[in-house]
Amino acid sequence: MDALSDKLKNGFEGKRVVVVGDPVADQFVMGSIDRVSREAPVFILRHDETVTVPGGAANAAANIASLGAEAVLIGVLGEDANGEALRRSLEQRGVETAGLVADKEGATTTKVRVLAGQHYAQRQQVIRIDYGGEKRYHEDLYSEMKEKIALAAQTADAIILSDYSYGSAIPEIGNWCTGISAEFDIGYLIDSRHRLESFWGGSATPNQEEVEEILGKNFTSTDCEELRARLRLDSLLVTRGNKGMMLFEGDKPPVDIPIVGSDEPVDVTGAGDTVIAAYALGLASGLTFLEAASIANHAGGLVVMKRGTATVTFDELSNSLRYSEDSGSAVGTS
């Protein structure tokens, strides 16, 4: 059997993935607790710095780039300071941003996390403030998105639809991606926060809670296989936190993929973005669904041990695969 690390020895260089969906500006406001305020029984935070990193669909694109492939992000961004900060952050990470469509009337979806701690102590998140919610953009913006998707797909190896219900990845755009991926014979993957049933075709990577919203708390493998068939998916990869993953393919029995690494994550923020990025690149590289799911499992296990909205590098992924193979616990080789 060929080891996965051998199959990926040339990395993902030259692979090109288009990420369509909801870009989010993840902001981290960091500081030190100075004293208790006299105005109210609250701490005063002495501000140190504010950092903006890619979140949502932008995080999936950032993971594609950090894994050594070419990432193209298509979605709607507000013409505001947060949007500009997010665009700069993406470009610094090597993500192509020409596919971002400007909404001159709306604000960029932003999640602000305030991290506080005493001097020389580990900062902890004390509150999160969200700007923006579910919306529908003007039809002209969706028409522009469709044009950019069709153009980008001509040189792409896969398309990811990343739906956070913030307006960019509406079902109409999902249907367009399904058709475009079929036209150019490239992989199509779906990650939808609350409306997976609104999309169809390709592969999907929901987490357990998202599947429970559809099938109920005590869903079975049979339920998942029926869901896969109903949505006309080639594969359904269910992520289950510290219980690993379950892979469903139509003509094969379900596969239970055990967790990689610690079962006590440091931070699960954006882990699903890392999983779908690695899964897409694995499939684009000619791996089987099980092999691609295995590397996605490793990537997810690595990113949850990092704080904040993080990414995984190809070297980290490769080292994790080799360690697993050397210890005899590898899953997904053929």
Image (spheres, grey):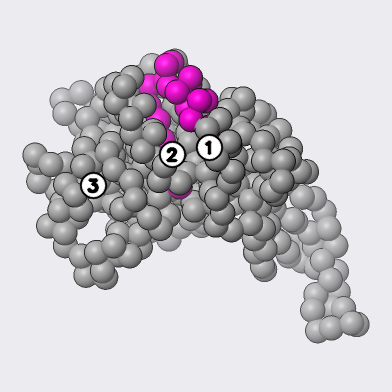
Dot label at residue 231: 3
Q: Nearer the viewer, mark 3 or mark 2?
A: 2
Q: The residue tagged with tag 1: helix, strand or loop?
A: helix
- Residue drawn at x 36%, y 42% is 190
Label 2 Cα crowd, 10 Å radius (few <14 / some 14-19 / many 20+): many
Quarter of the figure with the N terminus: top left
Spatial separation of the CA atoms under disc 1 and disc 3? 24 Å
Left/right of residue 54 with respect to residue 151 in the rendered view: right
Left/right of residue 331 with respect to residue 104 in the rendered view: left
Quarter of the figure with the C terminus: top left
Spatial separation of the CA atoms under disc 2 and disc 1? 7 Å
Q: Is residue 27 magenta?
A: no
User: Is residue 26 shown to the viewer in this render?
Assistant: no
Image location (x, y in percent) of residue 236: 25, 45
The residue beneath circle 2 is 173
Q: The residue tagged with tag 3: helix, strand or loop?
A: loop
Label 1 Cα crowd, 10 Å radius (few <14 / some 14-19 / many 20+): many
Q: Earlier in the sequence, mark 3 or mark 2?
A: 2
From what the image shows, is residue 118 above or below residue 58? below
Q: Earlier in the sequence, mark 2 or mark 1?
A: 1
Left/right of residue 234 with respect to residue 208 in the rendered view: left
- Residue drawn at x 76%, y 43% is 80
Q: Amino acid at mark 1?
A: Tyr
From what the image shows, is residue 60 above or below residue 265? above
The front one of 86 and 179 is 179
Q: Quadrant of residue 241?
A: bottom left
The residue beneath circle 1 is 142
Which residues lie in the magenta part? 145-163
Q: The residue tagged with tag 2: helix, strand or loop?
A: helix
